[in-house]
């Protein structure tokens, strides 16, 4: 493999600084003491690095609770998204049944529809079902993901049918065929969907903002905006909260990078 | 056949029931609600197309719709930027993967974190003004987020910054599907890099560009979190977009019917734009999707 040419390398370095710079600045701010923030010219590293902001944000607001809320929402949301997509993708890939075309049409139509246009009625529905200020209310409307269903359908389609024919001869029923033979084979696609769902639920914002009134139920994304309103004068504390909130998605991304690339590519049907 | 249908619907049941409740039902009821005046407490009051009439004479709603459409400026800039970025990163070279990874970090980061960081960077006494002042590019600090004539563009900058990596990865995949022989042949014929870009790369990327333009347009018309965190629609409604106005009408003013009619208009605009995109790009391979 050839090394990068110097000119291109320089250009890439400048671009990388533009992309990573704001995060670097956020981290530096979060470990700065009170004198450091508006020091100009900006220091590349604070004169008196401290973890004080982290301990302050942890004690001033129920950060642990926000983490727990986020984890519950992300875990349940991701798991159910995988389950529903894995179930629904199977007949769409493998079975012939009445109304298949209509269901396809509806699924594609909903893919285009802005969920923002559905917010108001969904809020009223959740209010009727008693789901305001509950975890279920946060993830229930989005666990039937058309994106996920199509992704899994694509995965089932790529499995040779001979396997199922053999299993059918052995007397395997539809459900156990799905559970024992097909599901393990689409595991890579499930993993890809899982990382996307994880990041999606972790970062989801508008819907939790609407359905949660009790600050104790807030996930981190909503809690951060609340925090920045409360500590508008001391953004070193908010920066510490922001760094804590972005860390898990960053770790998941760095550890599972290849799934992101794969997901984006399969998402466009190639 | 009949048994198979039964089994199929068994597998589809959870998805269909949830999509009916949370997608199909709201389309119907939302459209109906747009014909009523409703504040979630008293009985809904039928006003026919009154809400729609009101929207077109309501300066805030009009500004919001206008700003949402203006926000589409980010689409061509974002697409061209990410194509160029993808071209820059397309060669297999030592260390190139690290750059690809770095450019993708904003994509996986919460929009709230991104918007907060930029809100401070763009503050009057923030880092950006500090840098520009110190190299004497400007004399007075620029009011990035507090000047009504530029606030919306400052917010667009953040959307652009966050989106580049996302589309870059999709374009990289598209570029890797192009046979390098085309480029080599063109080079032999003495084509310049600009000619290769315009005559070979862009036409062959067309299906990818079509897809990216479509989702990018939809995303631009739905922009919300950046606005909520950075400007709250201000100053003087200069950054109020359609979704922000819907949110404000719904959550703060409890005008559920009126907010629904704005939602209907937004859905129609998105549908129309998607159709135009489809028509525009059809020739050249939208069939792939």
Image (spheres, grey):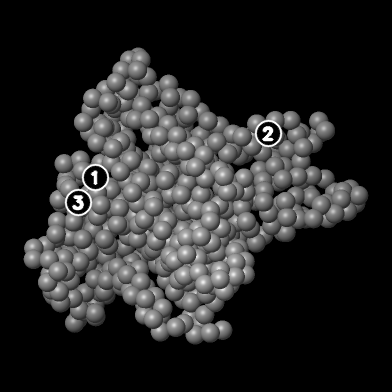
- Please identify the residue farthest to the right as the structure is shown: A169
In the shown orientation, is residue A87 left or right of residue B94? right
User: Residue A220, can we see it?
Assistant: no
The residue sitting at 37% across, 42% down in the picture is B221
The residue sitting at 24% across, 79% down in the picture is A44
Q: Position of residue B287 (x, y in %)?
A: 62, 45
Q: SS class of the residue under badge 1? A: loop
Residue carrying label 2:
A101
Residue carrying label 1:
B239
User: In this rendering, which labeled residue sits more in front, label 3 or label 2?
Assistant: 3
Query: Same chain, marks 2 and 1?
Result: no
Q: Nearer the viewer, residue A251 or A216?
A: A251
The mark tally for this picture is 3
Indicate the chain on which mark 1 is placed: B
Q: Position of residue B93 (x, y in %)?
A: 52, 80
Q: Nearer the viewer, residue A60 or B93?
A: B93
Q: Position of residue A69 (x, y in %)?
A: 41, 53
Do the residues under discs 1 and 3 have CB atoms within 8 angstroms? no
In the shown orientation, is residue B208 left or right of residue B120? right
Q: Earlier in the sequence, mark 1 or mark 3?
A: 3
Residue carrying label 3:
B150
The residue sitting at 26% across, 32% down in the picture is B62
B176 is higher (above) or lower (below) than B231 = below
Indicate the chain on which mark 3 is placed: B
Do the residues under discs 2 and 1 have CB atoms within 8 angstroms? no
B151 is higher (above) or lower (below) than B94 = above
Whole-number angstrom distance, CA of label 2 to CA of label 1:
42 Å
Whole-number angstrom distance, CA of label 1 to CA of label 3:
9 Å
- Please identify the residue farthest to the left as the structure is shown: B139
């Amino acid at each position: 493999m050839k090394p990068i040419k110097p000119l291109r390398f320089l250009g890439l370095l400048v671009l990388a600084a533009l992309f990573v710079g704001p995060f670097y600045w956020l981290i530096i701010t979060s470990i700065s003491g009170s004198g450091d923030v508006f020091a100009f010219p900006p220091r590349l590293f604070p004169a008196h690095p401290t973890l004080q902001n982290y301990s302050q944000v942890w004690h001033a607001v129920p950060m642990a609770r926000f983490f727990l809320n986020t984890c519950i929402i992300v875990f349940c949301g991701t798991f159910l998204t995988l389950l529903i997509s894995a179930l629904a993708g199977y007949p769409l890939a493998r079975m012939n049944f009445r109304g298949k075309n209509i269901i396809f049409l509806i699924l594609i139509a909903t893919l285009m529809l802005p969920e923002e246009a559905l917010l108001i009625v969904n809020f009223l529905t959740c209010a009727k079902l008693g789901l305001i200020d509950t975890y279920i209310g946060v993830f229930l409307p989005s666990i039937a993901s058309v994106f996920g269903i199509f992704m899994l359908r694509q995965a089932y389609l790529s499995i040779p049918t001979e396997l199922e024919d053999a299993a059918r001869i052995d007397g395997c029923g539809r459900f156990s065929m799905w559970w024992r033979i097909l599901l393990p084979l689409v595991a890579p696609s499930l993993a890809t969907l899982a990382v996307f769902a994880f990041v999606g639920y972790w970062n989801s914002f508008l819907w939790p903002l609407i359905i949660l009134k009790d600050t104790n139920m807030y996930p981190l994304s909503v809690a951060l905006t609340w925090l920045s309103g409360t500590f508008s004068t001391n953004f070193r504390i908010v920066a510490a909260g922001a760094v804590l909130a972005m860390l898990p998605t960053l770790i998941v991304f760095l550890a599972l990078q290849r799934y992101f690339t794969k997901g984006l590519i399969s998402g466009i049907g190639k | 056949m009949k048994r198979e249908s039964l089994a199929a619907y068994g597998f589809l049941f959870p998805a269909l029931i949830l999509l009916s409740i949370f997608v199909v039902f709201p389309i119907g009821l939302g459209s109906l609600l747009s014909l009523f005046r409703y504040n979630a407490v008293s009985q809904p009051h039928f006003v026919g197309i009154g809400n729609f009439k009101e929207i077109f004479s309501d300066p805030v709603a009009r500004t919001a719709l206008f700003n949402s459409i203006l926000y589409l400026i980010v689409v061509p800039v974002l697409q061209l930027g990410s194509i160029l970025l993808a071209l820059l990163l397309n060669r297999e070279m030592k260390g190139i993967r690290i750059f690809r990874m770095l450019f993708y970090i904003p994509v996986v980061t919460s929009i709230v974190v991104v918007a907060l960081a930029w809100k401070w960077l763009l503050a009057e006494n923030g880092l950006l003004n500090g840098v520009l002042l110190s190299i004497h590019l400007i004399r007075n600090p620029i009011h990035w987020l507090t000047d009504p004539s530029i606030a919306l563009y400052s917010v667009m900058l953040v959307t652009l910054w966050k989106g580049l990596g996302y589309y870059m990865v999709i374009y990289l995949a598209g570029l890797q599907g192009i046979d390098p022989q085309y480029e080599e042949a063109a080079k032999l014929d003495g084509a310049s890099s600009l000619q290769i870009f315009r005559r070979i790369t862009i036409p062959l990327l067309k299906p990818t560009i079509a897809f990216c333009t479509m989702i990018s347009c939809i995303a631009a018309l739905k922009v919300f979190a950046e606005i909520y965190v950075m400007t709250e629609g201000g100053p003087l409604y200069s950054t109020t977009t359609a979704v922000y106005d819907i949110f404000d009408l719904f959550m703060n003013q409890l005008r559920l019917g009126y907010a629904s009619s704005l939602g209907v208009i937004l859905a129609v605009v998105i549908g129309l734009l998607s159709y135009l995109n489809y028509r525009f790009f059809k020739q050249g391979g939208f069939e792939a999707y």
